[in-house]
Amino acid sequence: MLNELLRSFLLIFAAEMGDKTQILAMTFATQFSAIEVLIGVALGVFLNHGIAIVLGRYISKIIPLNLIQIIAGLLFVAFGVLALVDEEDKEESKKKKNFGPIFTVALAFFIGELGDKTQLTAMTLSTEGEFPFFILLGTTLGMVAVSGIGIFVGCKICKKIPEIAVKIASATVFITFGTIKLFQTLPARYLTTINIVLYFVILSIVILIFLIKLINKK
């Protein structure tokens, strides 16, 4: 029982150290509070790995993972653009913080980890072990621990770097991961030169508009 928990914890912790998950957690920490990010990570990963463990090897037949990865890519790009938004409405921001940040982080990690190596690891461990709940608990704690390190680094960076630089860095991380994910999962017939150029032109215009607004306000 405890052996399975410890084993799954160590496997996930080692696999995700320095990986995109940790970087995303660090980036979210520059936007939301540490506790909100941790709760969001825990919820997203718990649901993600829970589905993997419950459905086992049939998950790929039930959920079109390629489509989910495309949605995840678009979601990350959207997060990147929204990171450049300057929130001035304090009351509205407080209302959003009661639910928004946690839901945002949970959704990002839930979708982003579908079909990823950590979910496949949780799936594999569940087919080998006898205590699936403890495997789920171990994999979730492993992700939370790795994310906690990223959040700590993110909070430290946020204190030493100007807010506008943090926003730009945050946007860059999300847009880069989102774009890479899209290019890796979109069917080849859509990755024509015209479509790629069009994508980057539209993205550059949108980023420039938000960036100019942000700089003018600051």
Image (tube, rainbow, N blue to C red):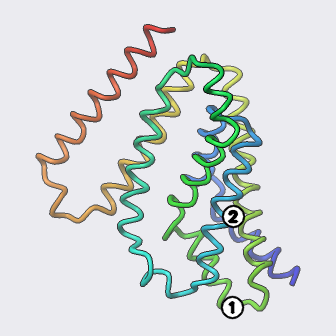
Q: Quadrant of residue 142?
A: bottom right
Residue 41 pos. (x, y %)? 67, 54
Residue drawn at x 39%, y 55% is: 181
Query: Mark 1 is on which residue type?
Result: Glu
In depth, the one of 55 and 191 nearer the eye is 55
Asked whether, in this view, residue 173 is left or right of residue 26, the answer is left
Asked whether, in this view, residue 202 is left or right of residue 29, the answer is left
Provide the secondary structure element on which disc 2 rests.
Answer: helix
Residue 212 pos. (x, y %)? 37, 15
Furthest-left residue in view? 194
Question: Disc count in the image?
Answer: 2
Provide the secondary structure element on which disc 1 rests.
Answer: helix
Q: Is residue 137 above or below residue 70?
A: below
Q: CA distance from mark 2 to mark 1?
A: 19 Å
Q: Is residue 206 above or below residue 213?
A: below
Q: Quadrant of residue 187?
A: bottom left
Asked whether, in this view, residue 68 is left or right of residue 83, the answer is left
Reading the image, the residue beneath label 2 is: 14
For disc 2, the neighbor class at 10 Å (few under 14, some 14 to 19, many from 20) is few
Reading the image, the residue beneath label 1 is: 128
Say which mark, if any, is on residue 104: none
Residue 60 pos. (x, y %)? 44, 81
Residue drawn at x 73%, y 51% is: 39
Residue drawn at x 65%, y 90% is: 127
Residue 63 pos. (x, y %)? 44, 76
Asked whether, in this view, residue 176 is left or right of residue 165, the answer is left
> Which numbered disc flags the more N-terminal residue, 2 or 1?
2
